[in-house]
Every structure is written in structure tokens, then in C-alpha cells.
Amino acid sequence: MSQALQSLLDLLDLERIEQDIFRGQSRFAVVPRVFGGQVAAQALVAAGRTVPADRPAHSLHAYFLRAGDPGAPIVYTVDRIRDGRSFTTRRVVAVQHGQPIFHLSASFQTYEEGMDHQADMPPAPDPETLETTAEMLPRYLGVHGDGGGDSNSDSSGDGDGDGDVGIVRRILEARAAVDLRYVDAPPFASVGRPREPRSQVWFRTNGKLDGAIDQPLLHVCLATYVSDMTLLDSVLLAHGRGGWVTGDVVGASLDHAMWFHRPFRADEWLLYDQESPSASGGRGLGQARIYTRDGRLAITVIQEGVVRIPR
């Protein structure tokens, strides 16, 4: 297991400070606020720890209310809304500095047999044939400024985090726990060239999960963490915008919903097939399906976010 993955697991291992109150730590994302996927994953951990292990999560619905402060812990309060014969419902509020920053409702269900059908998995290249993020990103240094176009540039930056070198360093640090591979060029490599609002990435954790930590809830929480990384990329592609990497768009997640259809492992390859059906009013909508490598539909995701062009 990589050190980056262990650090992410530590981040998701919340401290219980009361029966239904948990505390999680924070860290910087690519931008100077808490990464939304981190808050969503931690909130789902908090909810799951109040539910019997034989009831896996089947859906979550969440709203991002305020930007999180990466320099302060986050307190998660769980309300036990319902404990039924088949379904369990939990509500979680994440609080920083006395104010709610995130709200989550999650539902859990005992296993049942039933009708079964799914949308077919779309075609996609084998993930092992694609570049890793660490291999791909340095090739775009200098495309938008001070990287000088030299793919051998030192991506450690000069400590101030400015320019392409600093951006690439922050992206690699933020995603080090995940092996994420783009099928096509990402938005920041397609600036000024609008294209179909669709994108695909393969992802898995950067290391295997085993032993005591290998629990179904953890795989679901890790997928929740990754689901916020690239879903609005398809919005940017439709308009030839590079987004938060190039600074030609200001964005933030507004709400996020996920449905977990079939078991999966976050340490095995998952295809994230994403598209944007609409953008208007300073908001963009992304919807996606996540498939296992053998073609099973594991998760459906929908997210809306702020997507504004700076003045």
C-alpha cells in the first residue's frame, strides 16, 4: 500500500467523540479549501458507523453549503432518522467554526434478491494502456504559462504554488492516493477547442486494501471520494474551458447524489463514464455511470456545480 493511500485511509478513520458525533481532519485540495469528495466520504463514514454492517449503503444525497477550512477539523453529527426492517436512513451535518458546511442523507439496505438489468458498459481502452496522471500532467507544463513547455521541468515548484508547475504539483499531491487515468485529453489540455461533453477516466486506489481495513463501507466511501474529482469536466469540455486548473472558470460543487447498485472494489479498476446534459445560469450538470472492469454497472452519479466565467 502506498503512503498516500494510507494517509487517505487515516483521513477517513474518524474519531468518535460521542455516540453519534465524529471528528475528522482536513487537508488542502488543488484549491485552498477542503476537497468536496473528502467531506462527502467522511460524512458517509460517520453515517455508516451507526448502521449494522449487514446493511450496505445504497444511496446518498448531499449539499455543499460552505467552503471548508483545511486548517480546522470537521465535526460530523449523525441523526438516526429511521431504522426499518429493510432500510436504514441517516442524516449527517458537517460543521466547522460553528457553521454547517455540508449536509448528507444516506440510505442503507439489507441484501435482497430481485429483478436485475443494467445499461451496457460503453467501449473504453484497457486502463493499463493509458498514461498515469503523473506521466500525463508534466506534458502540459507550459501550455498555459510559466512551465516553459519543458516536460522535464521540476514539478516540485518553488514553494509558492504559483504557475503551471505549482498547479501540477498540487494536483499530483491531491490525487496521489488514486491511480486515475484519462481516456481522452482532460479539459486543461483542450482549451479553446470545444468538443462533445463526454469524458471517461479509469480509476482505482494506489494500492490494495486487505486485512482489517478491507470492509464494504470503505470501498463505497473511497468511490465517493473519487467521484468528485472529474465529474464536471464534461461541462468544461463543451465550452473549451480549462477550468480550475487554468483559471478560466470558477467552480464549486453544489449538490451530489450517488446510487450504489452492485458490489465493487475501489482497489480494482472502475470506469467513470461522464457526460453533461446541460449548463445554464452559472451552473453545470454532470451525470455518470461507474462500471467494474468486467462490465457490471456499480454506481450512478449526478452532480451540479457552480461554473462561472470570471470577469
Image (cartoon, rainbow, N blue to C red):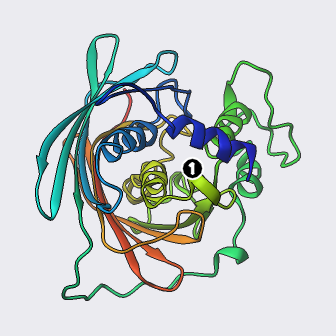
Q: Toward the viewer: 43 or 125?
A: 43
- Judged from the image, the secondary structure of the residue bearing numbered disc 1 is helix
**Above/below status of 69 relative to 288:** above
The residue at the point 79 percent across, 28 percent down is 157
Kind of residue at disc 1: Phe
Q: Quadrant of residue 65?
A: top left
**Above/below status of 280 relative to 154:** below
The residue at the point 27 percent across, 73 percent down is 111
Q: Toward the viewer: 109 or 310?
A: 109
Residue 305 left/right relative to 126: left
Is residue 144 visible to us here?
Answer: no
> The C terminus is located in which quarter?
top left
Query: Residue 81: x percent and y percent?
Result: 12, 42
Q: Quadrant of residue 204?
A: bottom right
**How many marks are shown on the rendered structure?**
1
The residue at the point 85 percent across, 45 percent down is 150
Give the residue at the far right of this rendering.
Answer: 152
**Above/below status of 96 relative to 203:** above
For disc 1, the marked residue is 188
Residue 1 left/right relative to 186: right
Query: Residue 60: x percent and y percent?
Result: 25, 52
Give the residue at the far top of this rendering.
Answer: 97
Query: Residue 31: x percent and y percent?
Result: 52, 29
Is residue 85 visible to us here?
Answer: yes
Q: Toward the viewer: 232 or 99?
A: 99
Q: Toward the viewer: 95 or 30?
A: 95
Crowd band around label 1 with a 10 angstrom C-alpha radius: few (<14), some (14–19), many (20+): many
Q: Quadrant of residue 50?
A: top left
